[in-house]
Image (cartoon, rainbow, N blue to C red):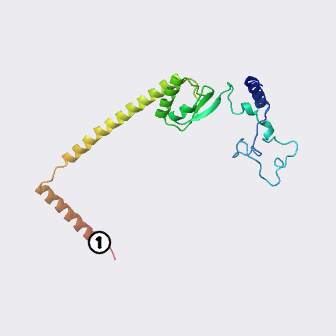
Amino acid sequence: MNKEKLLKIKEQLKKSRPNFIRQDYQVKRLKKVWRAPKGIHSKLRRKFKGHIKQPVIGYRSPKQVRFLTIEGLKQILIKNIHDLKNIDSKNSILIIANIGLRKKLELLKKIRELKFKVSNIENIDDFIKQEEAKLVERKKHRIELKKKKKEEKPQETAKEVKEKPKTEEELKEEQEKKKKEEIKEQRKVLEKPQ
């Protein structure tokens, strides 16, 4: 059989394949994602009739088409530019999610030169334009923040400059005030009833 027929068979199998749902998915804290039943009395684990279908090897797609996309391309995960060396035109590229924006842009430019297909980004040119615009905005924002910090620093130094060293008269006045306050505190302690 040629690949086109196998791909059609794969798609038909996908449509006829049931949704494998977790046993007690109705409970709020459980998601619908399949988990194998583990209870001792579980009817699903013991394969009783009339219960949800379980994933079995019979639902698997044909071996020749197993990991191919609808276009008949094999998907390959890519983390950096060095991973692009091993790729042919028979492969489709998947860029990993946790890659930084700058590296992603470098990768996409290289992919655009080599004319490969990326399956998790529809239009490479539009994506590059949007993300580069975001990078420019970020740089502007950082520069503005640095300017604000620089403006705040001179004001602080100006305050320090305003605080000139005090003259002898001012120092004497401060000492007299402190003495008066100490005397008041002593009187309060003495006047307290015992």
**Which residue shows up at 67% across the image and 28% down it?**
69
Q: Is residue 125 left or right of residue 188?
A: right
| Front residue of this view, candidates 177 and 36 | 36
Name the quadrant containing residue 13: top right
Residue at 82%, 51% in the rendered image: 42
Residue ranking furthest to the right: 49
Give x and y (percent) for residue 63.
Answer: 74, 34
- Image point (88%, 43%), residue name: 49
Give neighbour class at mark 1: few <14, some 14-19, many 20+ (Cα, 10 Å). few
Task: Choose between 4 and 129: the one closer to the eye.
Answer: 4
Name the quarter where the N terminus is drawn.
top right
For mark 1, what is the residue?
189
Q: Nearer the viewer, residue 141 or 157?
A: 141
- Determine whether 147 is above or below 39 in the image: above
Q: Quadrant of the C terminus?
A: bottom left
Q: Residue furthest left?
A: 168
Secondary structure of residue under mark 1:
helix
Q: Residue drawn at (73%, 25%), measured in percent from left and top?
A: 3
Residue 29 rendering spot, x and y as whole percentages: 69, 46
Asked if residue 161 is positioned above or below residue 128 in the image, the reply reads below
- What type is the residue that disc 1 sits on? Val
**Where is residue 48 drawn, in percent x and y?**
87, 46
How many callouts does the rendering have? 1
- Residue nearest the viewer, comparing 112 with 158: 112
Q: Would you place residue 75 above or below residue 4 in this image?
A: below
Q: Name, please, the residue furthest toward the bottom.
A: 194
